[in-house]
Image (spheres, rainbow, N blue to C red):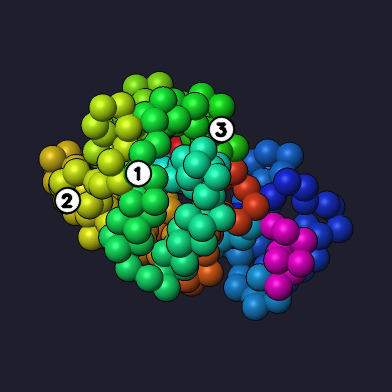
Amino acid sequence: MNLILQGKAISRDILEKIERLARPEEIEVISENAFRLKKASCDANIATLCEENRLDHAYVPESSRLSDFGLIVMDMDSTLITIECIDEIADMLGIKPQVAAITESAMRGEIDFSESLKRRVALLAGLEEAALGRVYDERLKLSPGAEILLEKLKSLQIKTLLVSGGFTFFTDRLKERLKLDFAASNTLEIAAGRLTGRVLGEIVDAKGKADWLNRVRESLNLEKEAVIAIGDGANDLRMLAEAGVGIAYHAKPVVREKAAYSLNYAGLDGLLNLFPD
């Protein structure tokens, strides 16, 4: 196995300590703050050392290549983008703390996602539709490394699916802006220019995300092993389980425990360091 180390800063001292524990055959410099320790040994102390120094580490099969994959599936809120859109929409009504508390509980897996979404959306009833545009224009930011990752995926002709428990108002705009191949999410009901407090159609919940992954995967004639899924909350667990590789991105503990790899400190482009071309 190759041991991938990455973070915002990796000192020579820390790298040498990990090298003594891992005893790799060779150290490949991927970038200033990313290294591939080839044919490394596993040592429980490596995880502790990395956590203490805010470094991501992952043991990746030597044969794995990014070109082995044909589809990357991403969550939107707090994954592709830095915000939870529904919390920022709620802020337009001055009720962000109430809605954010429900969001956090759902992401930790403490309450059912579909029920939590209905409760949160109901609190938005009466809000002008224009507030959604303000959230997109003023508050929505891409996660660090997102554009680097997407540019690389396009160069390798790897398809992208953005699937979210959030809303089409945002996923549709991101799909067009970032030239993503597929997008799926929930539709807010709007009447007379205001939110009604209801969601139209079947809610894209944990099962819905997994179903969308499989629907697109099958349409591309790909096997499960050719899919990478990236998410951060409990609502992403079923989606990650349906992928050949599941990656927890700045995720809740329940997701980090289940995912094959975790990116806790690196940006989204940290995925590229896990798998050479």
Q: Residue at x 61, y 64 (%)?
A: 40
Give the quadrant of residue 205: bottom left
Mark 2–mark 3 Cα distance, whole angstroms, equals 27 Å
Question: Dot 1: what SS?
Answer: loop
Marking on residue 139: 3
Which residue appears at 30% of the width and 63% of the height?
Answer: 115
Q: Residue at x 42, y 73 (%)?
A: 110
Q: Estimate the x, y position of residue 98 in percent, counting from the top left.
A: 51, 58
Nearest the viewer among 235 and 19 is 235
> Whole-Å distance between the Cαs marked 2 and 1?
19 Å
Q: CA distance from mark 1 to mark 3?
A: 21 Å
| Residue nearest the observer in this picture, 251 or 190 | 190
Residue at point 62%, 48% (across, down): 266
Dot 3, crowdedness within 10 Å: few (<14), some or many (≥20)?
A: some
Q: Is residue 53 magenta?
A: yes
Q: Magenta span covers which residues?
A: 48-55
State yes or no: discs 1 and 3 in contact (Cβ < 8 Å). no
Q: Quadrant of the C terminus?
A: top left
**Kind of residue sitting beneath label 1:** Ala
Q: Is residue 58 left or right of residue 187?
A: right
Residue 241 in view (yes/no): no
For residue 125, the mark is 1
Marks 2 and 1: which is nearer the front?
1
Q: Amino acid at mark 2?
A: Glu
Q: Which residue is mark 2?
A: 202
Q: Nearer the viewer, mark 1 or mark 3?
A: 1
Q: Quadrant of residue 124?
A: top left
Q: Earlier in the sequence, mark 2 or mark 1?
A: 1
Q: Residues within 10 Å of mark 2 (few under 14, many from 20)?
A: few
